[in-house]
Image: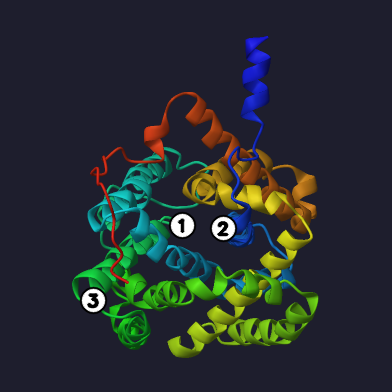
Amino acid sequence: MSILIELKNLFRFSPKVKNDRYEWIDYAKGIAIILVVYRHAAYGLISSEITLKPWVIDLNNALYSFRMPLFFLLSGLFFNKSLLKRSVSNYAIAKVNTLLYPYLLWAVIQITLQIWSDGYANANRTSADYLNIFLQPRKLDQLWYLLALFNVSMLYLFTSVILKVQKRWQILIGLVLLGIAHFLKDISTLYDIALHYIFFAIGSLSANFFFSEKTKERLSSFACLLVLLPVFIISQYYFLLDPEMNLYLYAIVAIAGSIFTIVLSFILVKFQIMRFLQVLGHYSLYIYLVHVSVGAFIRYQLININWFREHTTAFLGLMIILIIFFSILLYRTLMMMGLQFLFKGNFRERKITSVTSNH
């Protein structure tokens, strides 16, 4: 009986604690993580010499513009709230535990697995790739995002608290960094900071706006979505035609896609549609960490089945579903086994009696 209970709990994916006020955040993260898995699953199949239909690749490339900037914007929304709950040092410790620690750990795990599993991994890894953990995280598949978000968070913390730069001037810093990002491409650690700082800053600046109940009421309408839809389609199509566009134009395209996704999330929450997106958003970080390795294993198991080779779009759709499902299942299994250290550091935050905001 206890085994059945454990199995039931294992497959109970819905989070126990829900914050209805921020449901839309998880919906937006859920949409973004599907797009992340879509891209990596598609290019995993292409690397395995599976031919996908042109429209599948074009749609993937068009939607590439905003999914990662959206994650940075959503993280920026909570910057001020986090400082209200924590001291400056505790904010930094929390980011080490939730971003830097899992990045370093899973980068080592993923590189090691890819070296050992040369038979079904598309990436050709060598021991030299361990240096890329610090210098060229963009070469380590999906994991670069965690280091980039950690670095951006720390830089924003430094400029806002130590240098006391006001939020409206943070946008100027972001614009300056965008201007020099092109010159930093050879070192992707620095490039990702320069490219994404602006989105974190916009999130921090617009937090009061997006967390307002009046905003939620105004934006959770189909009329608002229909107004934004042409802008969204045109901007994403423009990105498809010119993915190497000027980074200032790229920022506008990415913001347009992010705002459209946020408005869509408001509407889905209002009408309680597609609630599975909230679940995916809750697990988005853990899906992000493991989905490339999970996807490589699933692809290896299915790729030689003739039906899938003949129906590549269906193959991709199934891959996306299986990758997400088994990524969550793997995370929950490891957590039930008491292996929490795989996903979060254990550096203790300092006890404080009160926290004052610098804003």
Gap in Å between the C-alphas at discs 2 and 3?
A: 39 Å
Taking the image as shown, residue 291 lies to the left or right of residue 228, namely: left
Label 2: element kind? helix
Query: Which residue has dot 3 on it?
Result: 164
Q: Is there a contact, CB below 8 Å, between mark 2 and mark 1?
A: yes
Q: Residues within 10 Å of mark 1 (few under 14, many from 20)?
A: some
Look at 64% across and 74% down and name the residue there.
214
Depth check, front residue: 304 or 95: 95
Badge 2 amino acid:
His
Residue occupied by mark 1: 142
Mark 2 to mark 1: distance in Å? 8 Å
Q: Which amino acid is tagged 1?
A: Gln
Q: CA distance from mark 3 to mark 1?
A: 33 Å
- Residue 81 in the image: state x and y as whole percent: 41, 61
Name the image quarter holding residue 348.
Answer: top left
Of the pair 118 and 192, the residue shown nearer to us: 192
Of marks 2 and 3, the one in the foreground? 3
| Callout 3 secondary element | loop
Please indicate whether residue 4 sits to the left or right of residue 127 in the image. Answer: right
Residue at image x 55%, y 42%? 294
Foreground of the two, 153 or 54: 153
Residue ID for mark 2: 40
| Above or below, 274 relative to 158 | above
